[in-house]
Image: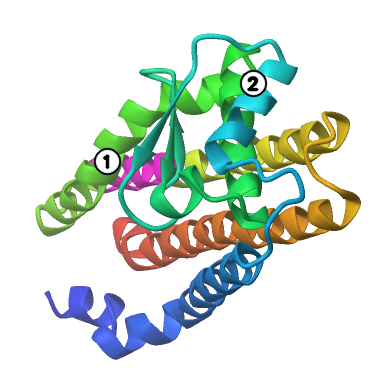
Amino acid sequence: MFDFFYYYGYGYFSYLIFMLPALVISLWAQISVKSTFHKYSGLRTGRGLTGAQAAQEVLRFHNVMGVRCERVAGQLTDHFDPRTNVIRLSDGVYGSDSVSAVGVAAHEAGHAVQYAQEYGPMKLRSVMVPITNIGSRLSLPVILFGYFLSIGPLVTLGIVLFSLSVLFQLVTLPVEFNASRRAVKTLEQAYVLSEDELKGVKKVLRAAAMTYLAATFTALWSLLRIILIFGRRNDR
């Protein structure tokens, strides 16, 4: 029992020290995306297209039909739901004609295009969602159960389950980067935005991409933490 508390922290303080780099990066990414989005929310587009209209422009450019755009409550809660084929845009994006709104909406439309064109990483991520959800809920209970009962294979199973969340984050990166590239390229080729407006969109999407990089780094760092604590004990 003493070993558990020794390896599992020297308490909570040890955990914070170990996780400090991940916490700092995550905090910086969140602040960056919010400040960048706010900055370009004050810059209106020349054509006056709203986020919802820009998303439809991207879909039409790629001949993607049957995708609805809906408003969803919250701030930066924008997402594409492949189960219902719906793009959901937040209040600050759906009806806004700002550079930030158009960029975010075009990014989510990029996901819809990925889904329609059966983009490989997008299909893999969709398949992984239910498996990852189960793994993330069960991983820690399985690890602790195996640890306290000294069942090594159960601890290993828990670590593997947690690793699924890390793998999901890794698969998410190309999906998000590709959606942003599609968004910027389409907005340029369809003449939705001017050159200066496109620069703003790139900055908004680049800041958003940092949140995914931060989430991936945090997941990898957490996995390392679990392996150091329970993996070493499991080998004894």
Whether residue 157 appears in magenta in the rendering, the answer is yes
Q: Residue at x 50, y 28 (%)?
A: 125
Q: Amino acid at mark 1?
A: Pro
Label 1 crowd (10 A; few <14 / some 14-19 / many >=20): few
Residue stretch rendered in magenta on the structure: 154-165
Residue 83 on image: x %, y %:
37, 19
* 136 left or right, relative to 80: left
Q: Do we see residue 172 in this rendering?
A: no
Residue assigned mark 2: 59
Residue 182 on image: x %, y %:
74, 33
Q: Nearer the viewer, mark 1 or mark 2?
A: 2
* 191 left or right, relative to 177: right
Q: Secondary structure at mark 1?
A: helix
Q: Residue at x 50, y 70 (%)?
A: 30
Indicate whether 194 appears above or below 8.
above
Q: Nearer the viewer, residue 209 or 16?
A: 209
Residue 128 on image: x %, y %:
42, 27
Q: Residue at x 87, y 30 (%)?
A: 189
Q: Nearer the viewer, residue 155 or 31?
A: 31
Label 2 crowd (10 A; few <14 / some 14-19 / many >=20): many
Q: How is the image coloured?
A: rainbow
Residue 6 in which image quadrant: bottom left
Residue assigned mark 1: 153
Q: Amino acid at mark 2?
A: Leu
